[in-house]
């Protein structure tokens, strides 16, 4: 193997590594954005659960926890 060939191979590997590092950075940004979105969605779901409990508490309560209906 000549010096030029070794130098060319090293250059090619360095270029390949730079592309991989760039792709890894892009993937990291996507994963970070997705996690932020998941966190927001989980907060929204928790808020919706709270609102549902206010509007229709019997949907979420255990029947044993329900107050008995008024007797006539």
Image (cartoon, grey):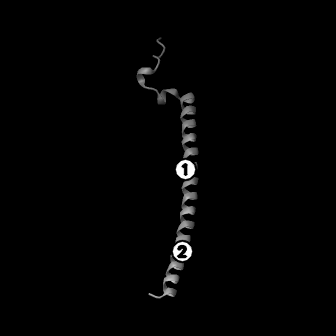
Q: Nearer the viewer, residue 10 or 2?
A: 2
| Residue under the point 48% across and 27% down | 58
> Are the two marked residues, 1 and 2, in contact with CB atoms closer than 8 angstroms?
no
Q: Up-down: is 19 above or below 47?
A: below
**Alpha-carbon span between mark 1 and mark 2:** 31 Å
Q: Position of residue 25 (x, y in %)?
A: 57, 62
Q: Position of residue 9 (x, y in %)?
A: 49, 81
Q: Nearer the viewer, residue 44 or 56?
A: 44
Specify whether 53 is left or right of 62. right
Q: Up-down: is 52 above or below 15?
A: above
Specify whether 59 is left or right of 32. left
Residue 22: mark in rendering = none
Q: Considering only order in the chain, which callout, 2 or 1, is on the residue closer to the N terminus?
A: 2
Q: Quadrant of the N terminus?
A: bottom left
Residue topped by disc 2: 14
Q: Position of residue 3 (x, y in %)?
A: 50, 86
The residue carrying pointer 1 sits among few (fewer than 14), some (14 to 19) or many (20 or more) residues within 10 Å by Cα, namely few
Element carrying mark 2: helix
Q: Up-down: is 58 above or below 7?
A: above
Element carrying mark 1: helix
| Residue under the point 56% across and 32% down | 50
Q: Position of residue 41 (x, y in %)?
A: 56, 45
In the image, farthest residue toward the front: 3
Q: Nearer the viewer, mark 1 or mark 2?
A: 2
| Callout count | 2
Residue 35: mark in rendering = 1
The residue carrying pointer 2 sits among few (fewer than 14), some (14 to 19) or many (20 or more) residues within 10 Å by Cα, namely few
In the image, farthest residue toward the left: 64
In the image, farthest residue toward the top: 72
Q: Up-down: is 39 above or below 18?
A: above
């Amino acid at each position: 193997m000549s010096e030029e060939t070794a130098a060319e191979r090293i250059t090619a590997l360095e270029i390949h590594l730079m592309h991989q590092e760039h792709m890894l950075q892009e993937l990291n940004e996507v994963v970070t954005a997705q996690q932020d979105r998941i966190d927001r969605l989980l907060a929204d779901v928790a808020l919706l659960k709270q609102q549902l409990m206010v509007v229709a508490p019997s949907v979420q309560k255990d029947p044993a926890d329900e107050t008995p209906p008024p007797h006539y």
